[in-house]
Image (spheres, grey):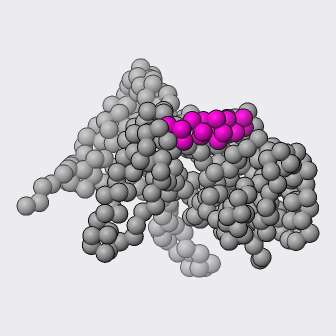
Amino acid sequence: MSEPQATLAPSADLEIKDARIIFEPIWDDLEAEYGREHLRFPKEIILLGGAPGSGKGTNTAFISKTRGLTCEPIVMSSLLDTPAMKAVKDAGGMIGDREVLTALLHELLKPEYRDGVILDGFPRTTVQVVCLKMLYEKMTQLWRDHYGSPLAGHFRQPVVQILVLFVDERESIARQLKRGREARAHNEEVRRTQHGILLEKRATDFDEHLAGRRYRVFKEQTWDALLSLKDVFHYHLINAQGSLAEVEQNILRELEYQSSLELDPLTYNRLRLLPVASEIIIHARQELVKRLDGYELNAPELFQRVVNFIEDSLLPVIRLHAISGHANLNSEDPLLQEPAALGMLIDIFSERGYHAVVDVHHIEIPERVDLASGIIHCRVKRIHRIAIRFKGSEIRRG
């Protein structure tokens, strides 16, 4: 596929600022070049923003892992660093919104981004913000048009999330200057030993005034552009002031799986009546207490028999497995044929800190053979298999 051509943008006064005039010809060209059935964009696009020193580079790999993304992020500054784009900049021009959008849309169509991708450095202008909304509308329409068709698997409901790593100006400046000191020390060591790769040095990493200016430019441009999308897409503001471990926990909390966001609406509607585990367990302790007290009040004799059975028949075996924390037991005791007794047994173990699972197996035992017909008559033997798990003993090995 040929590289999208960049042209020298006219002066800022002459550059087209109407998003629709910019977007629609680019989209028409995509349809003509690829064919509408091949305009397969990522299922999920994460717009990653952050002030200088907020840790975008540091945390990108963790964000990808959290979302299960295996592709490299799309970094707009690198995407626009092609020979064609460099020629524009070398001629004293600026990369216009049309060139940025053309390059990005071609990149997003690459197969490696199908399941999702992190996009760093877009949008940065008001025009790009509007174009992003138009792209989302087009992606949504493609999903609707192909729904239920043989190509539906290639056109899933799109999800756009905005993830902004936030640090205040003071922290941003401190981190930029620290990066500068580390880069200078690293490069001095590389020159001394003739081993390693020199790191790029930014002027802003060595001047407090320039570092502060860079932060303020971010707040005035990229921050405002992303913030304007807050009511359109899912917006996550991550506190990135703390340690790396703290920031990772903040990211995990924000990006945890949300079925209502990620599943197709029809899929979600089919599943939503089934309770999620968190709803079941939220009152589990109170319900356990209520059931145990109910056993004592309403069926004390059976309750005592179950306690005696556990104490006499099960605990001696469980104690033998105190190191492993896992015991499997088989029982044919008639007591367990009473449904209420099984519930009591499981609840008693739960209250005592064990995890108990009971499975019933039916085994046919031959008893007699009808010599006339050759039919073998069997009796059914019911065996209750009880699995008990608990925290085992820690044995120091010297």
Q: Position of residue 13 (x, y in %)?
A: 83, 45
| In the rendered image, the vertical position of residue 326 relative to residue 274, given as above or below | below
Q: Position of residue 312 (x, y in %)?
A: 24, 43
> Is residue 392 found inside the magenta-colored segment of the image?
no
Residue situated in front as seen by the camera: 115 or 93: 93
Residue situated in front as seen by the camera: 192 or 262: 192
Q: Position of residue 265 (x, y in %)?
A: 77, 45
Overall secondary structure of the magenta section: helix
- Quadrant that contains the N terminus: bottom right
Residue at the (35%, 63%) spot, across then down: 187
Residue at the (68%, 50%) spot, across then down: 122
Query: What is the quadrant of residue 74 in the picture?
Result: bottom right
Residue 238 in sight here:
no
| In the rendered image, the vertical position of residue 7 relative to residue 220, given as above or below | below
Q: Is residue 295 left or right of residue 67?
A: left
Residue at the (48%, 70%) spot, across then down: 366
Residue situated in front as seen by the camera: 4 or 261: 4
The magenta segment: 212-229
Residue at the (68%, 53%) spot, across then down: 44
Q: Is residue 329 left or right of residue 62?
A: left
